[in-house]
Image (spheres, rainbow, N blue to C red):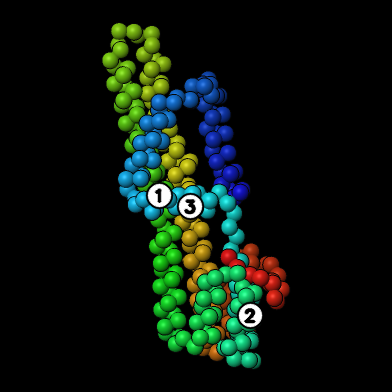
């Protein structure tokens, strides 16, 4: 479980509910099933209409990427690249094939395999860049999907409120019930705005941040593979790729040689 996601959700919900209670409200006042059905049913339906069935099937994957911690091993990838650079200089590119099973990052494996196969550097660059581009495009669908839901949710809330007000105005003969009925009608707006700003949009931002980090790692790997292919000095490769490391990675010892590395 991603602690930041869980902590953020809890903090937002606790403070919102606590503030409502301090104003004299009760938790039971915030629960209204018809408003819930209108907002979430309408939002989900509109989001499904906006995307293809194949995109919708990947929702569990995108949710998993939000709630599950997926650390990226920048230092491990760098160490593997340096090791491969040293082996390539000493023993030639074909010697790298024996080291590939030690690497978990499949993008790195595919790139090194092209080096072993003697692929032209320009073709290697084109293939790696195209793979990064396709990866980013596919993953950004999750970001777009949750942003779509975040845009529809407040509108569905307003629709729910309008529907509730229609019911209220059609029963003006019972003034004693008007206050409670109006409050219930406005719960739909609350659900719509709250779900957009606590769930859908933050989830979208989380997905986008993960994609940016993964693309950054892939770009580091691409740079390292091309440097190996060009026969650059392993020490210079380490210095060049160290620029890509997150701040905390500069304070951590590098992975031991031979340890499996990956995303």
Q: Count residues near mark 2 (Cα–Cα under 10 Å), then give few for <14, some for 14-19, many for 20+.
A: some
**Residue 8 x %, y %:** 56, 43
**Residue 36 x %, y %:** 42, 30
Q: In 3D space, how far apart are the residues under numbered discs 1 and 3 (Cα atoms)?
A: 10 Å
Q: Residue at x 39, y 53 (%)?
A: 55
Q: In 3D space, how far apart are the residues under numbered discs 1 and 2 (Cα atoms)?
A: 39 Å
Q: Nearer the viewer, residue 259 or 174?
A: 259
Q: Quadrant of residue 33?
A: top left
Q: Specify whether residue 75 is in view.
A: no
Q: Which marked residue is nearer to the observer: mark 3 or mark 2?
A: 2
Q: In 3D space, how far apart are the residues under numbered discs 3 and 2 (Cα atoms)?
A: 32 Å
Tag 1–tag 2 contact (CB < 8 Å) = no
- The residue tagged 2 is 99
Of pointers 1 and 2, the one earlier in the residue sequence: 1
Q: Which mark is residue 56?
A: 1
Q: Nearer the viewer, residue 239 or 116?
A: 116
Q: Secondary structure at mark 1?
A: helix
Q: Which mark is residue 62?
A: 3
Q: Quadrant of residue 34?
A: top left
Task: Classify 257 as above or below 11.
Answer: below
**Residue 145 x %, y %:** 39, 50
């Amino acid at each position: 479980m991603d602690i930041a996601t869980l902590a953020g959700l809890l903090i937002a919900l606790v403070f919102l509910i606590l503030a409502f209670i301090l104003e004299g409200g009760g938790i039971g006042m915030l629960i209204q099933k018809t408003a819930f059905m209108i907002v979430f049913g309408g939002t989900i339906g509109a989001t499904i209409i906006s995307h293809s069935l194949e995109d919708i099937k990947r929702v569990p994957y995108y949710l998993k990427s939000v709630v599950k911690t997926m650390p990226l091993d920048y230092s491990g990838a760098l160490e593997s690249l340096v090791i491969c650079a040293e082996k390539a200089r000493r023993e030639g590119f074909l010697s790298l094939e024996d080291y590939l099973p030690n690497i978990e990052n499949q993008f790195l494996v595919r790139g090194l395999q092209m080096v072993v196969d003697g692929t032209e550097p320009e073709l290697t660059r084109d293939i790696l860049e195209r793979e990064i581009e396709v990866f980013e495009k596919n993953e950004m669908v999750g970001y777009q999907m949750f942003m779509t839901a975040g845009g529809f949710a407040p509108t569905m809330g307003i629709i729910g409120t309008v529907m509730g007000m229609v019911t209220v105005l059609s029963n003006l003969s019972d003034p004693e019930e008007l206050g409670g009925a109006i409050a219930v009608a406005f719960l739909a707006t609350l659900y719509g705005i709250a779900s957009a700003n606590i769930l859908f949009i933050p989830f979208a931002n989380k997905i986008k941040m993960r994609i940016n980090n993964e693309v950054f790692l892939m770009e580091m790997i691409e740079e390292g593979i091309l440097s190996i292919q060009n026969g650059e000095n392993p020490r210079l490769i380490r210095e060049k790729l160290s620029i890509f490391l997150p701040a905390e990675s500069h304070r951590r010892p590098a992975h031991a040689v031979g340890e499996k590395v990956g995303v």
